């Protein structure tokens, strides 16, 4: 009787799910906040190190904005055109769009810096070479190369999906070219704008690619406070401003994405491709050039370097084994995060309350913290006396850290998916008398499940590539593949580094494509109306 | 003169025949309502008449000119049609007025003239007061009336309406239909509408036929 009352009690269900989420996210966030507070203390900065700099902030914002703008233009164009190719061609292009995302941005920078070195732009010096303009352009170009397919994927999703229905509505009145200009392009723009915001967030927080091009941005400065000067308290204090910028940008992205999504709830347009706009040969050729240059190019360079000294690459079996372990740990972390996220999102959907926003902000905070800060925070939590020593001696701490850091991804996706669901669904749940955990499990979770699954896949891929957290929290003696990759790059063992990068990119790409296919099937099963 | 002459139209989807030799003849200025249960091919018939779907067999002639069939195809925008889709959509980045104005994008009218005509069309369906509103602020019935205005604003020779009065109450439907009939009579516009409700045919003062097994048969 008591159990039944608990199961159907809305407040109990809401706090149970919130409790799970807070157990995962709150300790590292609190540990970080305490560290940051200590960084502002009177004796915290005896060496008088710089915590805040307008010049650094301005440079970081400028680079991130240029990257977002270029990625939006390039990706928006390529995604829109790809949405109108044949099924086989668009499937091939989709794989090409996923490939750069599955490659860490620092690897993109490594590829393009090697290309610049070979082209004589760095004066023969890999580390210290290059003029200011070359380095700035290289950093921007490397990040565009890493992130441009995010807007491309967003534009593709709209161009091949709801934009077809909007364009069909226009065809009795307008030619395909007019319909494309006045209906297709404006339909794609909100999704491209939202994804450009995401690119801005990622580019603003990126430290590896800019550091390789000898450019100091705010995130690179924070990382150097953590790793070069070993001032974790100052680093935590310094990272509050970039974390705030990232948080504000992410909130804006969420709003734009929610608005863009609201216009996509239309039925499929069941017409022949010939009736709607189709790209000309020139546009298709332009698409091919961009994809060849920005996707096939880096991949070819990586494979070429890896193959140049095949004998050393052949001894990589151990590292590839570690890649397998990394995938297992990152998947376990993503699964934990996605499970908590789907319950939390479903609980918020079935029973709204004033705590909703605060809980969301706390969950997102772990995502906005600097990576090294999050890693150190988990490390300090795991060193508490109440935590068993086995926690740090095993990959459990790494799984916990990755789960807490990337929980925001499935949480945001699940929340966005639920925001698209007709409010009457929720009212029907209330009318049917299902409340509390029963309502969450029977309705909320299934509705949010496909989005949470997509979030799981993205979080797993991010977890495999995550460097500072892995470096700080992984158990002694078994470094994850991302740490190995960093070490190989650091010690200029190019062939091995590129071989690991190619294995990581191709493996993660197949994982993402597989997850997308499963998500699509799940969505059809659970949400036939969408 | 026959405004619409469709002969032996056949269309397969996933190898299943949706239209199976459907034939239709509508004289100029006449209004015809096609009834039938869901999934019988009514919307496909409208799409073929509009040029949004090509028939697998059969042909369509509009005002004596072959529009589809035997290798000939006139694109939708060159058929002088106005269309209201089932679950009509307004483009979310445009206001109600801009949505209607878009249907005049191929005309040679000045911008001012296009705006005037769009406002007139909105007024015909009683929604000129919503001209500046965005679609996400309109109710289902208001969206439907803006879509009806959009279909007639360019004075097309043929109107193809799919469930045109969805979301309208009976009284509003009768007022809207009376205004539309008045417009069609003055302009000698031909109408083919698809509906589930016999009352729609009454309101439009239209002839009725039924679709059954992919063919058009007289109403029993």
Image: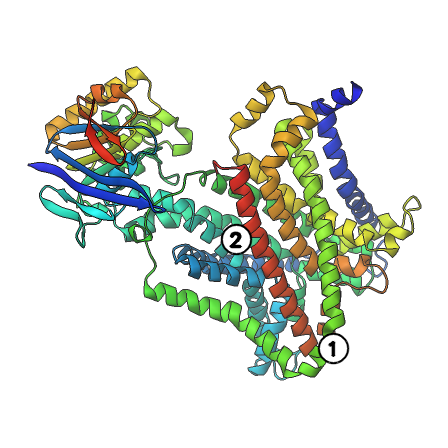
Residue B45 point in image, percent of width and height:
25, 38
Q: Nearer the viewer, residue B35 or B145?
A: B35
Q: Residue at x 82, y 51 (%)?
A: A396
Q: Is residue A487 visible?
A: no
Q: Nearer the viewer, residue B41 or A49?
A: B41
* Residue A487, quarter of the rendered image: bottom right
Q: Which mark is residue B126?
A: none
Q: Are marks 1 and 2 on the same chain?
A: yes
- Disc 2 is placed on an element classified as helix
Q: Is residue A250 left or right of residue B161?
A: right
Above or below, A55 relative to A162: below
Residue B52 point in image, percent of width and height:
27, 45
Q: Residue at x 85, y 65 (%)?
A: A477
Above or below, A44 relative to B52: below
Q: Quadrant of the N terminus of chain A?
A: top right
- Disc 1 is placed on an element classified as helix
Q: Could you tell me if the residues under marks 1 and 2 are in contact, i.e. CB atoms within 8 Å?
A: no
Q: How far separated are the C-alphas under marks 1 and 2? A: 40 Å
* Residue A58, quarter of the rendered image: bottom right
Q: Nearer the viewer, residue B36 or A504?
A: B36
Residue A126 point in image, percent of width and height:
66, 79
Q: Residue at x 65, y 68 (%)?
A: A503
Q: Residue at x 64, y 44 (%)?
A: A410
Of discs 1 and 2, which sits in the foreground? Answer: 1
Residue with the mark numbered 2? A196
Identify the mark nearer the N-term, 1 or 2: 2
Neighbour class for label 1 at 10 Å: few (<14), some, many (≥20)? few
Q: Mark 2, chain letter? A: A
The chosen color scheme is: rainbow
Residue with the mark numbered 1? A315
């Amino acid at each position: 009787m008591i159990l039944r009352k608990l199961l159907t009690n809305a407040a109990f269900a809401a706090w149970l799910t919130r409790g799970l989420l807070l157990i995962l996210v709150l300790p590292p966030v609190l540990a970080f906040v305490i560290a940051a507070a200590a960084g502002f203390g009177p004796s915290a900065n005896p060496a008088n190190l710089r915590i805040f700099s307008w010049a650094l902030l301005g440079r970081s914002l400028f680079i991130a904005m240029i990257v977002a703008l270029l990625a939006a233009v390039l990706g928006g164009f390529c995604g829109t055109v790809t949405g109108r190719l044949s099924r086989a061609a668009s499937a091939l292009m989709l794989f090409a769009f996923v490939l750069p995302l599955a490659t860490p941005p620092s690897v993109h920078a490594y590829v393009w810096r090697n290309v610049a070195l070979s082209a004589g732009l760095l004066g023969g010096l890999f580390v210290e070479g290059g003029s200011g303009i070359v380095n700035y352009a290289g950093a921007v170009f490397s990040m565009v190369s890493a992130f441009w397919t995010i807007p491309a994927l967003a534009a593709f999703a709209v161009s091949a999906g709801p934009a077809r229905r909007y364009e069909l509505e226009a065809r009795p009145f307008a030619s395909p070219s007019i319909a494309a200009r006045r209906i297709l392009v404006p339909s794609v723009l909100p999704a491209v704008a939202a994804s450009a915001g995401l690119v801005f967030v990622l580019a603003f927080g990126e430290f590896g690619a800019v550091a390789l091009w000898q450019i100091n941005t705010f995130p690179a400065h924070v990382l150097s406070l953590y790793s070069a000067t070993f001032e974790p308290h100052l680093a935590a204090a310094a990272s509050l401003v970039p974390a705030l910028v990232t948080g504000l940008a992410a909130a804006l992205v969420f709003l734009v994405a929610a608005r863009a999504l609201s216009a996509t709830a239309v039925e499929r347009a069941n017409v022949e491709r010939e009736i709607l706009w189709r790209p000309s040969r020139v546009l298709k050729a332009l698409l091919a050039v961009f994809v060849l240059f920005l996707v096939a190019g880096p991949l070819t360079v990586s494979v070429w370097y890896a193959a140049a000294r095949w004998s050393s690459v052949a001894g990589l079996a151990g590292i590839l084994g570690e890649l397998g372990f990394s995938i297992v740990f990152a998947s376990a972390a993503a699964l934990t995060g996605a499970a908590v996220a789907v319950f939390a999102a479903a609980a918020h959907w079935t029973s709204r309350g004033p705590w909703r926003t605060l809980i969301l902000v706390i969950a997102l905070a772990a995502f906005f913290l600097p990576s090294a800060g999050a890693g150190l925070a988990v490390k300090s939590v795991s060193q508490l006396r109440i935590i068993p020593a086995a926690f740090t001696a095993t990959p459990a701490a790494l799984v916990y850290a990755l789960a807490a850091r990337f929980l925001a991804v499935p949480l945001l996706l699940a929340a966005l998916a639920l925001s698209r669901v007709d409010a009457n669904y929720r009212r029907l749940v209330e009318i049917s008398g299902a409340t509390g955990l029963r309502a969450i499990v029977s309705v909320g979770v299934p509705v949010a499940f496909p989005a949470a699954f997509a979030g799981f896949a993205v979080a797993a891929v991010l977890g495999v590539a995550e460097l500072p957290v892995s470096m700080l929290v992984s158990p002694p003696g078994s470094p994850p593949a991302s740490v190995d990759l960093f070490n190989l790059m650091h010690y200029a063992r190019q062939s091995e580094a590129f071989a690991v990068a190619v294995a990581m990119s191709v493996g993660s790409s197949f994982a993402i494509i597989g997850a997308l296919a499963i998500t699509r099937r799940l969505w059809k099963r659970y949400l036939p109306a969408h | 003169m026959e405004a619409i002459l469709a002969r032996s139209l056949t269309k397969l989807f996933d190898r299943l025949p949706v239209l199976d030799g459907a034939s239709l003849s509508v004289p100029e200025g006449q209004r015809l309502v096609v009834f039938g249960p869901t999934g019988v091919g009514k919307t496909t018939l409208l799409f073929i008449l509009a040029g949004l779907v090509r028939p697998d067999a059969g042909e369509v002639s509009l005002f004596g000119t072959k529009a589809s069939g035997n290798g000939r195809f006139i694109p939708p925008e060159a058929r002088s049609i106005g269309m209201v889709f089932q679950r009509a959509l307004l483009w979310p980045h445009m206001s109600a007025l801009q949505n209607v104005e878009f249907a005049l994008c191929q005309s040679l009218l000045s911008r001012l003239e296009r705006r005037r005509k769009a406002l007139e069309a909105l007024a015909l369906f009683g929604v000129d007061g919503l001209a500046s509103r965005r679609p996400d602020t309109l109710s289902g019935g208001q969206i439907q009336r803006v879509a009806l205005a959009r279909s007639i604003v360019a004075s097309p020779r043929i109107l193809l309406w799919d469930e045109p009065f969805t979301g309208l109450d009976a009284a509003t439907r009768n007022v809207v239909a009376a205004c539309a009939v008045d417009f069609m009579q003055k302009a000698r516009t031909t109408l083919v509408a698809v509906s589930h409700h016999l009352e729609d045919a009454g309101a439009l003062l239209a002839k009725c036929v039924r679709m059954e097994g992919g063919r058009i048969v007289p109403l029993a």
